[in-house]
Image (tube, grey):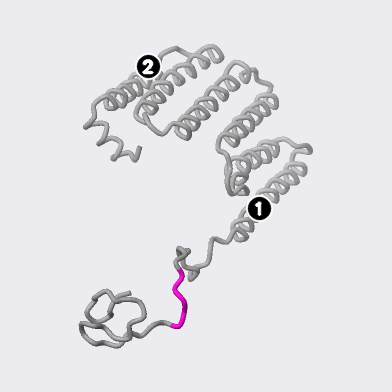
Amino acid sequence: MYCVQCGVRLEEGVARCPLCNRQVILSETPISNKPQSYSDRFPQECRHARLTFLGFLTTLMAVAGFVSFIVCLKTQGHAAWSGYVMLGLALAWIIFVLPGFFKKSNPLVFIALDTLAVGGYLLYINASLGHHWFLSFAFPVTLLVGGLLLVAVCLYRNIKGGRLYITGGLLIALGNLLMLIEFFQHLTFQTSMFVWSLYAVSALSLMGLFFIIAAMIPPLKSYMERKYFM
């Protein structure tokens, strides 16, 4: 306890300050030593409003899909182009809306789910058009992209140190993935090889090597970690 006028420390039970003779006025409310919680002046985040908005988006997308299906039936006599619309809306809902219903969601689960959803949508397009590019192109590319995303998220979530090494390795892996995509494109559509992937591999590999070398130089490592919040 301190004097409000001169700031000297007072003993318990004194009526006046011994230095400036100011009267000590004690509060009638007992002082609690418990840590104070955050102020309740501002309300907490309203989860109900977020769920209402997500429900509205879900309803809007469902209505849009149903309307496209009815219009397609009246104009084409069967579900022709409406299948792309409905499944595209379902894919968008899975990727953008579904994670919002879960307050603490595991991104690894949703990345795997999104990969399956994208693969299913591409399979439907391939089957409806009567083409044969899914197994030789879309399927491996979707799995490779989804696998790289899973590895990246898993590494960044579980490994606290060495972020520069991880970033450099992922950039090099991304470059090789782009070359594999062009390879599958070459096998499926008989296109020329090394038209664009060689430039991507070169650029991403140089960037990846830069991050790895930067991790070996302490001053540069410290600067890069501050610069990119690693």
Under mark 1, the amino acid is Leu
At horizontal 62% and vertical 28% (from top left) the residue drawn is 119
In the image, is residue 29 part of the stretch drawn in magenta?
Answer: yes
Left-right relation of 116 to 164: right
Q: Residue 198's mark? A: 2
Q: Position of residue 93 (x, y in %)?
A: 63, 43
Left or right of 172, for residue 50 = right
- Which disc, if any, is residue 60? 1
How far apart are the two marked residues, 2 and 1, measured between alpha carbons? 44 Å
- When the figure is inspected, residue 44 is found, relative to residue 90, above or below; the finding is below
User: Dot 1 lies on which element?
Assistant: helix
Q: Which residue is located at x 39 percent, y 21 percent? A: 172
> Mark 2, residues whose alpha carbon is within 10 Å: few (<14), some, or many (≥20)?
some
Amino acid type at image mark 2:
Leu
Q: Give the residue at x 41% y 14%.
A: 194
Nearer-the-camera pick, 28 or 184:
28
Give whichever of discs 2 and 1 has the lower sequence position.
1
Assign a secondary structure to mark 2: helix
Q: Position of residue 30 (x, y in %)?
A: 46, 76
Inspect the magenta stretch and tell me whether residue 51 lies in it. Answer: no
Q: Nearer the viewer, residue 230 or 117?
A: 230
Q: Which quadrant is the N terminus positioned in?
A: bottom left
Badge 1, how many Cα within 10 Å: few under 14, some, many 20+? few
Residue at x 60% of width, y 61% of height: 49
| Range of magenta residues | 28-32
> Is 33 drawn above or below residue 86 in the view shown?
below
Name, please, the residue furthest toward the right: 77
Nearer to us in this view, 7 or 165: 7
